Amino acid sequence: MEDDYAHPYEDSIEKFTTYEDYLDSQITPQDRFYLEEDELARQLVEIGCRKGEVLTREDFAARREAAENAKKARLQNAPKVLASAQKNLTDFPVLRHLACREELVRSGKLSTIIFIRDKNHRGQEISGYIDYGHRLKTENFEPYFERKKRLLPKSSDLSFYNWDTQHSTSNESPNFQILPDHEQGLLFKNKRDRKVISVDPRSEPGDNSKRLEVPTTEYIQVVIFDHMTRKKS
């Protein structure tokens, strides 16, 4: 029902803050000349002494609320600007690959794990597995796509290892569960379709999953694991 009021009434109703403002818009200069009092003129408009439809106070309130709700719904459903939008990433293959996936990952159609190995600001070599979807929801990615910040693994990511200090951490994310395996190494289970992703380069990544090693001079090593999610039946 909200959509019934969205377009015909939004422009005319929402511009009136109060019902009195609405009534005032129905009063003509001739009314003011003869009646001299706006309050009397409003009352005459309200009781129907005017050609055409005049909304009652209740109808006005209902239509104004419906118009506001419809406007809010359209704003909520409007396409959101991607963090990677209109960024020149021609010479940055890692960021270019992430930009290509951003919309799919944000929508939940694709789950992506990023493995990054590089050095931190202290010059220590670090590596880790990043849940791209979780990071997109919890961080502003524009500084990364604008190259003001470098995307690096953190101790709060799926997996983190400092090769110099040998400090390591592992954490579940909203999208992935960690499955340590002595034979296959580190495994990740997608929480949506329960499929397992193997990050061992000597094995297949798993059902509906692909492994991509990104040739780059930006990092020591970057590998992207894409998983097309299938809802468990």
Image (cartoon, grey):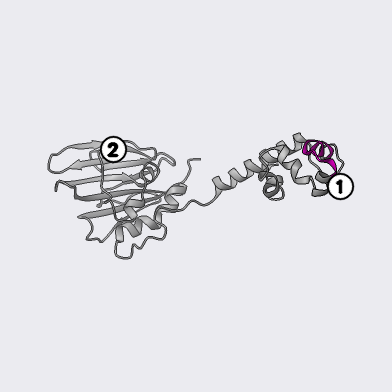
Q: Going by the picture, which residue comes out furthest to the left? A: 164
Q: Which residue is mark 1?
A: 51
Q: Is residue 9 above or below residue 219?
A: above
Q: Which residue is mark 2?
A: 156
In x, y percent, where is residue 106? 44, 48
| Residue 41 left/right relative to 107 | right
Q: Which mark is residue 96?
A: none
Task: Decide: few, some or many residues near mark 2? Use Cα within 10 Å; few <14, some 14-19, many ≥20.
Answer: some
- Asked whether 194 falls inside the magenta stretch, the response is no
In x, y percent, where is residue 153? 26, 45
| Residue 218 left/right relative to 109 | left
Of the pair 55 and 208, the residue shown nearer to us = 55
Three-letter code, disc 2? Ser
Residue 166 sits in quarter: top left
Tell me if residue 163 can be seen: yes
Q: Secondary structure at mark 2?
A: loop
Three-letter code, disc 1? Lys
Task: Decide: few, some or many residues near mark 1? Use Cα within 10 Å; few <14, some 14-19, many ≥20.
Answer: few
**At 33% from the left edge and 51% from the top edge, which residue is drawn?**
143
In x, y percent, where is residue 74? 59, 47
Q: Are marks 1 and 2 in contact (CB under 8 Å)?
A: no
Q: Give the extent of the magenta segment.
A: 34-44
Q: Going by the picture, which residue comes out furthest to the bottom? A: 90
| Residue 164 left/right relative to 194 | left
Magenta stretch prevailing secondary structure: helix
- Asked whether 42 falls inside the magenta stretch, the response is yes
